[in-house]
Each structure stands twice: as C-alpha cells, then as structure tokens.
Amino acid sequence: MVNYMNITLDIIMMITILPIILILYFYEYPRNWTKRKYIYGICNRDEYKQDRLKNEIDKISNKYNRQAKYILIALIILTIILVLIPYNMVKFMVFSYLALIAFFVIYIPFVIANKELKNFKKIHNIGDTKLNYTDLTNVGQIHALSIKKLLIPNIVGLAIILISLLCDLGFIHIP
C-alpha cells in the first residue's frame, strides 16, 4: 500500500527547495555578464568590456559559474536522496537543515568571486578615485522617534497580554 502522506510530503519538500536554488543559481550566476548591471555584486563598468580586461573577467566568471553549477547539482542530488529517507520526522528535520544550508552554500562562489573582482579593480586601478565627504554636524540633533510613539503601543500591547492572562487564569470573566 502506498503511503500518500509520504509522497505528498516529498513533493512539497522538492517544490519548496528546488525552485529556490534554481532561481538563485540563474539569477546570481549569469551566462553573459556583459549584459548585467552587476557582476557578483560589483558594478559592471564599461572598462571591463575592453578586450584585455574582458578576457580576465570571463575567466573569473566561468570559474565561479562552474563551481556554483557543481554546488547546484550536489544540492539537487541531496534533495532527491532526501526522498528515500523512510521516517517523516527524520526526513523533515534533514530537509529543514538542507534548506537552511542550501541558501548559504549556493552563495559561497558568489562571495569569493566578489572578493576576487574587488582585487581585480584594485590591481587595474578601476573605480572612483574621488573622496566623498558627509556633513555630520547635525547628527546629534536628529530625533526621529519620540517617547510617546514608543511607549503608547507598548502599554496597549502589555494591557492586552495582561487581560488575556487574567482571563485564562479565571480572574476576569468577559462575556
């Protein structure tokens, strides 16, 4: 006899994790970086599209796209293997950890590529060389929140919690 609860749980878990990691992969690791506004979190500049620099960035992009592809394949295989676990409680616990780990692991090549592109910018002197100054003379005078705006909602919330607690304990009877 087929246990439809297990099959339903398997389908829900696969529908939850697979599209998310696929979307993250295709969004963060583009095939053609020249058409994107950002490359691994670094602003895409016209200087990058010159022949000499373009070849180097192509190598960086291909290297980390390949690493991300291997991670994606491993996550897909782990998700499919997860279906084979016989006990629902263990399956759900492993799935929860896998989902949490997958969101971090898929970004590891992204972070490393970001660092490499920052070093690339420094080596080739690409970027803003001007200094920006911010006027901080009035920072101490800014008061965005007043005590009334914070205190009144907290008092109302505390009153609601106290009334519900007293009702649950039987001290107050609300019809």
Image (cartoon, grey):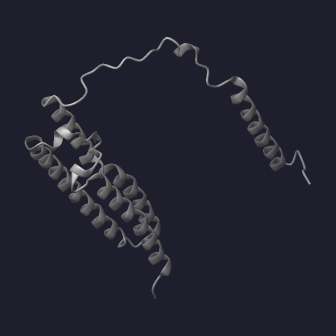
Nearest the eye: 152 or 51:
51
Q: Would residue 117 appear left or right of 153 to someone viewing this image?
A: left
Q: Residue 156, how many percent across, how many down?
A: 77, 37
Q: Which residue reaches farthest bottom?
A: 1
Q: Would residue 30 appear left or right of 87 to someone viewing this image?
A: left
Q: Residue 162, how many percent across, how many down?
A: 79, 40
Q: Which residue is drawn at 23% across and 39% down?
A: 45
Residue 23: image quadrant is bottom left
Q: Which residue reaches farthest top?
A: 137
Q: Residue 154, how many percent across, how many down?
A: 72, 34
Q: Residue 59, how many percent across, how many down?
A: 11, 48
In this view, 95 is above or below 117: below
Nearest the eye: 98 or 108:
108
Residue 131: image quadrant is top left
Quadrant of the image containing the C terminus: bottom right
Residue 87: image quadrant is bottom left
Q: Which residue is drawn at 45% across and 64% down?
A: 92
Q: Residue at x 37, y 17 (%)?
A: 133
